[in-house]
Amino acid sequence: MKNNKGITLIIVIMTVILLAILAGLALKNGMDTFESSKVVKFESYMKVIQKEVDIILEEGTDYMNLGQALTSEHKQKLQAILSNEFVETNSVEEPKLRYFSSSDIENVFNIKDVEDEIVVNFANREVISLNGVEKNGVMHYVEYGLH
């Protein structure tokens, strides 16, 4: 007569495989959520900066005292971005371009915890990220290209 009181090796293996599949699904969903949160954060601070740029121009503030002039390094990064179909700025030599570092973003626009560099084209009110955010395998450098 057989003793059927123990757990068989096959049941243990099937349980481990099932747990591995469930852990993989949970990890993938967690990563998707993390990527989505980066996009939402990017959209949020870009919208706030856009509204602040609008206010600066409407109030007649001298924007040439804000941020910094573009260096050759900034111009190289921006030139690579200008080929993006969603960017309206045409040239890195436009006179109304200003660069804002993370600390400038905090000081000028009152937004904390933004680890990005942006260029604002005060001629057409465009805000361009030099770092961008990836969504669905495509890099986006402006807020309105994400929709």
Image: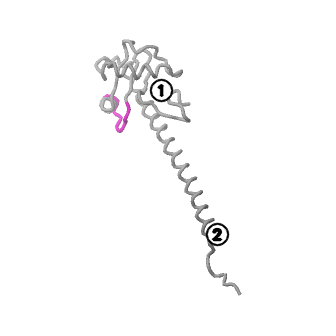
Identity, as a three-letter code, of the amino acid under mark 1:
Val
Foreground residue among 133 and 19: 19
Foreground residue among 86 and 8: 8
Q: Residues within 10 Å of mark 2 (few under 14, many from 20)?
A: few
Residue at the image point whose x is 49% and y is 37% from the top: 39
Q: Does residue 28 lie above or below 7 as drawn?
A: above
Q: Which residue is mark 2?
A: 10
Specify the segment rendered in magenta: 108-116
Residue at the image point whose x is 37% and y is 35% from the top: 115
Residue at the image point whose x is 30% and y is 31% from the top: 107
Marks 1 and 2 sit apart, C-alpha to C-alpha, by: 54 Å
In front of the other: label 1 or label 2? 2
Residue at the image point whose x is 64% and y is 69% from the top: 10
Q: Is residue 115 magenta?
A: yes
Q: Does residue 14 lie above or below 131 as drawn?
A: below
Question: Could you tell me residue 43's position as x and y percent?
Answer: 47, 33
Q: Which residue is mark 1?
A: 142
Which quadrant, please, contains the N terminus? bottom right
